[in-house]
Amino acid sequence: EMCIRDRLSSIGIWLRKSGYLKQAKLTLICALKHNQIEGNKVKLLTSIAIVSRHLNQNEYAINTYNIAKSIAENENISSSLATIENNLGVLALENDEVTKAEQHFRSALAKHQKNSNRSGNITSGINLLQAFLIQNKQLDYQRLSPSITRLTKACLLYTSPSPRDRQK
């Protein structure tokens, strides 16, 4: 049985994906008020930060991510920490803080690698490669690029349909 927090969270995510950003934020904040579990609080705060970024409320998003990060560190929720670091990197990049973005992407990549999160490795790795390109850090780019390329190709092979399925 779903509790009110789970229902509100699901509705909030649906509203965000459907483009109803203000309504999504209000719904997620309401879900947060009904929350009792720290791990869920991190997820809800992350969702609120994502919506805030889409609403161009970047300062609010950064503050919200930092609250979520603090809770995730205290609760040792490493998968959430990796996602938060990557998202903070994206915000830093959008604010032309490339050095700061690189630090966040490096941290995200290390955490995703520690968690064996392939899609997280790819996402934060591509973001880090972008930061290297912007800063003209060709050596760093050349060192990281082959491993991210291998991961991406392996992921594409793993998720693409078999030859028999493609013939249908």
Image (cartoon, rainbow, N blue to C red):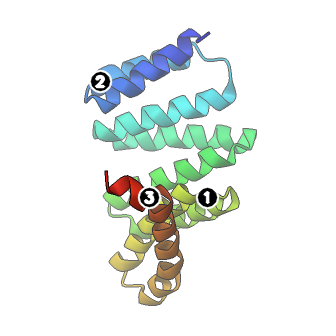
Q: Dot 1 corresponds to which residue? A: 112
In the image: residue 73, left or right of residue 140: right
Q: Earlier in the sequence, mark 1 or mark 2?
A: 2
Give above or below for 117 relative to 34: below
Q: Tell which tag, 1 or 2, sits nearer the viewer.
A: 1
The N terminus is located in which quarter?
top right
Q: Earlier in the sequence, mark 3 or mark 2?
A: 2
Dot 1 surroundings within 10 Å: few (below 14), some, or many (20 or more)?
A: many
Dot 3 surroundings within 10 Å: few (below 14), some, or many (20 or more)?
A: few
In the rendered structure, find residue 22 and report the number of the disc placed on it. 2
Front-most of residues 163 and 64: 163
Indicate the amino acid at tag 3.
Ser
Indicate the amino acid at tag 2.
Lys
Give above or below for 47 relative to 27: below
Question: Which quadrant holds residue 136?
Answer: bottom left
Q: Earlier in the sequence, mark 1 or mark 3?
A: 1
Q: Residue at x 46, y 33 (%)?
A: 47
Secondary structure of the residue carrying numbered label 1? helix
C-alpha gap between disc 3 and disc 2: 42 Å
Q: Dot 3 corresponds to which residue? A: 162
Q: Determine the residue located farthest toward the bottom in the rendered image.
A: 139
Circles 1, 2 touching at the beta carbon (< 8 Å)? no
In the rendered structure, find residue 4 and report the number of the disc placed on it. none
Q: Residue at x 66, y 37 (%)?
A: 71
Front-most of residues 17 and 85: 17
Give above or below for 135 relative to 19: below
In the image: residue 28, left or right of residue 108: left
